[in-house]
Image (cartoon, rainbow, N blue to C red):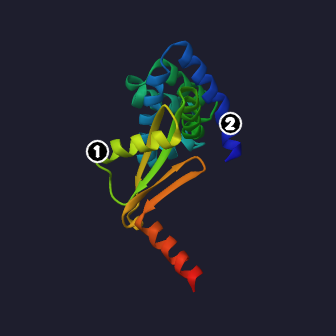
Amino acid sequence: MPLLNTIATPYAEALLQVTEARNETDTVAQQARDLLAIWEITPQLRAAMASPVLEPEAKKKALMALFAEQLTPSLQNLLKLLADRQRTAVIEPVLHRFLELYRQLRHITLARVTSATPLSEDQQRALHERVRAIAGSKSVEFDLCVDPSLIGGFIVSMGSEVIDASLSGQVRRLGLALAKVS
């Protein structure tokens, strides 16, 4: 993925500069998250934007027809620029990189939380406070996903730090401890 990062970073940095100058970085960050959520659940859209058959102008018109009403001019301009330069296939990496830079700028820690079942609002709040204290960060952003193979509990990943409070992790650690005893 280094090549994608090399392509994505200049666009993401430029978007961050523009949004900071316009005082709309927080708004654009939320719009980027929303756009990525749509992107993730719409494989047809991703395929169309990656297609070399569609002309850049058609891609630009499609993006504006779909998203113009929900996006700030800064984010609209980014999408148009990517279409003009035939780089619509890298929309996703650009938005992810923008969000990484945004989190760095705002001192927000990204915690990937994988749980066996969906977490309730109360569980998310309690976990948020604990993770914020552990991370020593002013704010924490969760990336939540569900993996029933964990059996119970959750796993929190923050950069290189992993907190495994899952039942499957406890079983694995117990098995390793028993293997050492034998």
Amino acid type, label 1: Asp
Does 34 sit above or below residue 17? below
Mark 2 is surrounded, within 10 Å at the Cα level, by few (under 14), some (14 to 19) or many (20 or more) other residues, namely some
Q: Are marks 1 and 2 in contact (CB under 8 Å)?
A: no
Q: Residues within 10 Å of mark 1 (few under 14, many from 20)?
A: few
**What residue does disc 2 label?**
7
**Which residue lies most toward the top here?**
22
Q: Which mark is residue 18?
A: none
Is residue 147 among the parts visible in the rendering? yes
Query: Vertically, is 180 above or below 105?
Result: below
In three-dimensional space, the C-alpha distance between marks 1 and 2, rounded to whole angstroms, equals 40 Å
Q: Residue at x 51, y 71 (%)?
A: 173
| Residue 122, disc | 1
Asked whether 64 or 7 is in front, the reply is: 7
Front residue of 121/9: it is 121
Residue type at tag 2: Ile
x, y percentage for residue 88? 57, 36
Q: Quadrant of residue 91?
A: top right
Report the side of 151 relative to 138 (left or right). Answer: left
